[in-house]
C-alpha cells in the first residue's frame, strides 16, 4: 500500500470514529492536544500521523490505535466488540494503575479458560 493511500485510509478511520461519537474536529483536536487544522489535514489524508499522534487521537476517541490503522471490513463491522472495548477502557480509567494490572491478570486468566473450553 502506498503511503498516500495509507494516509487516506487512516484519515477516513479517524473521521469515521469521530462521527460515530458525534464530536467535531475542533473538539477532537482539543481532546487530543492537536491543532484543529492539523486534524483536518490528517482526516483528508494530506499528512502522515506519527505513532504519538495516533495514540493521542485513539485515546481521545476511546478506541485503540489498531482500530485507527485497521482497514479490514470484517473487523470494522463488529460494533459490539468495539463497544465492549470502549466500556472496559472507560471503567479502567476510574481504577488506580496498580489495580488495573490485577484486572489485566484476571482477564488474561479468563481468556485462557475460554480458550481451553473452546478446544475441548
Image (spheres, helix red, strand yellow):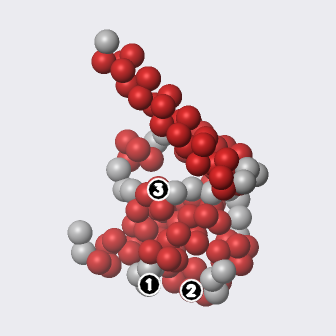
Q: Whole-percent x and y of residue 87?
A: 66, 43
**Sequence-first tag of 3 and 1:** 1
The part of the image, by quadrant, that contains residue 60 is bottom right
Q: Nearer the viewer, residue 101 or 8?
A: 101
Q: Is residue 75 visible?
A: yes
Q: Is residue 67 above or below residue 83?
A: below
Locate residue 96 relative to residue 80 in the image: left or right. Answer: right
Of the 4 image quadrants, the one containing the N terminus is: bottom left
User: Could you classify mark 1 by the number of other residues whose Cα lies within 10 Å: few (under 14), some (14-19), or many (20 or more)?
Assistant: some
Q: What residue appears at the point 38 percent right and 47 percent down from the top-left corner?
A: 73
Q: Residue at x 39, y 56 (%)?
A: 70
Can residue 83 be seen here? no
Q: Is residue 116 left or right of residue 90?
A: left
Residue visible at 66% across and 55% down in the picture? 97
Q: Image check: 59 left or right of 76?
A: right
- The residue that disc 2 covers is 38
**How crowded is the residue under tag 3: few (<14 C-alpha within 10 Å), some, or many (20+)?**
some
Q: CA distance from mark 1 to mark 2?
A: 8 Å
What residue would you read off at disc 3? 67
Label 1 belongs to which residue?
A: 47
Amino acid at each position: 500500500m502506498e503511503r498516500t493511500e495509507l494516509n487516506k485510509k487512516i484519515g477516513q478511520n479517524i473521521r469515521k470514529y469521530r462521527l460515530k461519537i458525534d464530536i467535531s474536529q475542533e473538539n477532537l483536536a482539543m481532546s487530543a492536544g492537536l491543532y484543529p487544522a492539523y486534524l483536518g489535514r490528517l482526516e483528508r489524508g494530506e499528512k502522515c500521523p506519527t505513532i504519538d499522534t495516533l495514540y493521542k487521537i485513539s485515546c481521545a476517541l476511546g478506541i485503540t490505535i489498531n482500530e485507527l490503522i485497521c482497514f479490514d471490513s470484517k473487523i470494522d463491522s463488529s460494533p459490539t466488540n468495539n463497544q465492549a472495548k470502549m466500556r472496559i477502557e472507560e471503567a479502567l480509567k476510574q481504577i488506580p494503575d496498580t489495580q488495573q494490572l490485577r484486572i489485566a491478570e484476571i482477564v488474561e486468566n479468563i481468556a485462557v479458560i475460554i480458550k481451553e473450553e473452546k478446544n475441548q
